[in-house]
Amino acid sequence: MTTITSIAELEEIYGRPGQTSLVKELDRIIPEYAAVIAASPFVALATCGPEGLDCSPRGDLPGFVRIADDTTLLMPDRHGNNRADSLKNIVRDGRVGLLFLVPGSGTALRVNGTAHVTIDANLCASFAVDGKPARSVIVVSVEAVYFQCARAIHRSDLWNAARHVDAGTLPTPGQMLAAASQQAIDAEVYDREWPGRAAKTMW
């Protein structure tokens, strides 16, 4: 196996990026980029910490990531499994990366920057859904923002319903937990109880 060990080797294979690949990267959110953020119900949040890297899915109502100004984003944190991996990383190392997706669109939007976590009561309340405020809010200071070309989404045929996988062909969360816990967790019980538990803690 041949391993690439330098930027020069990479550039020899891939060449240098063209003008459009470079000019699209900005240090602020322009209206066109804001439109993608406002339409997105799903973000992948990448963080880093002493234990390594983490990438967490974040989903909510479209536009749930709020644009405070052209260099600041606000992301509510909802109920989850209380591992708080992303939040722990942000507290210790504020570097973050966000990837916004919009169902039906081939365009993804990338944001890199630094973040901190706030529990300001008024701000958390402003993100309330069904009367339930956000548990905390991630405040992102934007350092770079640009759109990703559509090749990956087109190649994956991501939004084609005819290509969607039948969930019944995959292991259930309960089955995965049972295997990971060496059967200490009952798969059938977990899968049966999860929908009701999730409904009570969706927001």
Image (cartoon, helix red, strand yellow):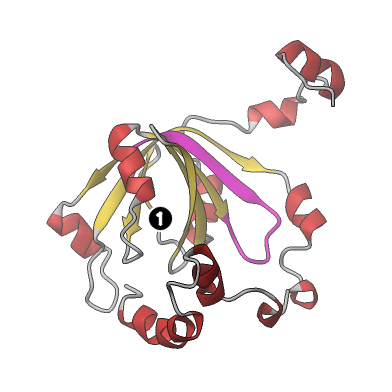
Q: Position of residue 6 (x, y in %)?
A: 72, 13
Question: In this rendering, would 144 be left or right of 92?
Answer: right
Dot 1: what SS?
loop
Task: Please state the extent of the stretch shown in magenta in the rendering.
Answer: 101-115
Please determine whether, in this image, residue 128 is positioned above or below residue 111: below
Within the magenta stretch, is there residue 174?
Answer: no
Question: In this rendering, would 103 be left or right of 194?
Answer: right
Question: In this rendering, would 201 be left or right of 150?
Answer: left
Question: Which residue corresponds to mark 1?
Answer: 65
**Residue at image location 77% in from the left, 25% down from the top:** 18
| Residue 171 shows in this picture | yes
Q: Position of residue 68 (x, y in %)?
A: 33, 47
136 or 165, nearer to the observer: 165
**Residue at image location 32% in from the left, 47% down from the top:** 87
Q: Could you tell me the amino acid type at mark 1?
A: Val
93 or 194, nearer to the observer: 194
Question: In this rendering, would 35 be left or right of 95?
Answer: right
**Residue at image location 74% in from the left, 76% down from the top:** 161
Main SS of the magenta part reads strand
Within the magenta stretch, is there residue 114?
Answer: yes
Q: Position of residue 195 (x, y in %)?
A: 43, 84
Q: Position of residue 38 (x, y in %)?
A: 47, 58
- Can you say which quadrant of the picture contains the C terminus? bottom left
